[in-house]
Image (cartoon, rainbow, N blue to C red):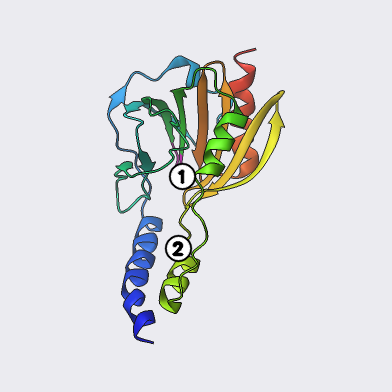
Amino acid sequence: MKNRSKYAIPMLVVLVWFLAACSHSPKFVAPEIEPPADLIPGYVPEGFELGGGYQIPGERLFPAIPVGDDIANFLRIRGFDLKSPNGNDILGVYYQGKDHLILISKSYFPKGSLDVWRAAYEASQPKPCECECAGLRLAHELFPVRLVQLQEVRTVEGTEVAILKGPMGWTTAFVRGDNLLTVESGISLEENLKIVASLLESQN
């Protein structure tokens, strides 16, 4: 019982953190650049407007969960970064909606493929907790070590697209030319894939 109470307060704090994030319109905060033209999709869901472009260091970065009025968007952590597996800079554009953001990004991924990306991603998957302590097992079950889970791979416009589910919603990842692209948002998966299709069509 003592071990469970030890983890109760941190779990409560995280719950409040999530509830606070849901009570405000999300805003994107990152170093701004001119929006890369090749990341402007031909399809954007109704109610979203282009907010701008951004560039951030890609090495060991992870998107943070929105809290309050802003997103402290990228925190340094150790491990595999699904948006920039080679540690290259991330270029992107973001679209602002009333309840959600749409983040479209790319990073240089020469000679890369979705198979290469997926193999690296799956190899970085931590092993399940085998600890004896009941409190630690409970914490592991409530907070998976990987926040973004790979769900499936689909083919869109002749290109394989990885579909992942995370705290901000759906993330899709695919290779276009020498770049790894991702589309991330809380919109529906169907809308996300329409954006992916338009990004692939524009390069054909």
Q: Report the residue marked by disc 1.
A: 100
Give, as a three-letter code, the residue at label 1.
His
What residue is at 52 percent from the left and 61 percent from the top? 128
Instruction: Look at label 2 and name its amino acid.
Output: Phe
Q: Nearer the viewer, mark 1 or mark 2?
A: 2
Q: Quadrant of the C terminus?
A: top right
Q: Majority secondary structure of the magenta segment?
A: loop
Report x, y in % for residue 186: 51, 46
Graded by Cα atoms within 10 Å as few (under 14), some (14 to 19) or many (20 or more), the crowding at tag 2 reads few
Nearer the observer, 104 or 96: 104
Residue 75 relative to residue 95: left or right: left
Q: Nearer the viewer, residue 48 or 40?
A: 40
**For numbered disc 2, what is the local secondary structure?**
loop
Tag 1 secondary structure: loop
**Residue located 51% across and 26% down the image:** 180
Residue 56 placement, left or right of 109 = left
Q: Position of residue 47 (x, y in %)?
A: 50, 37
- Judge whether 173 appears above or below 66 on screen: above
Membership of 71 in magenta stretch: no
Q: Provide residue 100's location: percent of width, then percent of height.
A: 46, 44
204 vs 91: above or below: above
Res 45 seen here: no
Q: Quadrant of the N terminus?
A: bottom left
Between 62 and 118, the one lying in front of the other is 118
Q: Which residue is mark 2?
A: 143
Q: Marks 1 and 2, Cα distance to the nearest angstrom?
A: 24 Å
Count of marks placed on residues: 2
Which residue sits furthest bottom?
1
Q: Which residues are magenta?
A: 96-101
Image point (27%, 29%), residue name: 31
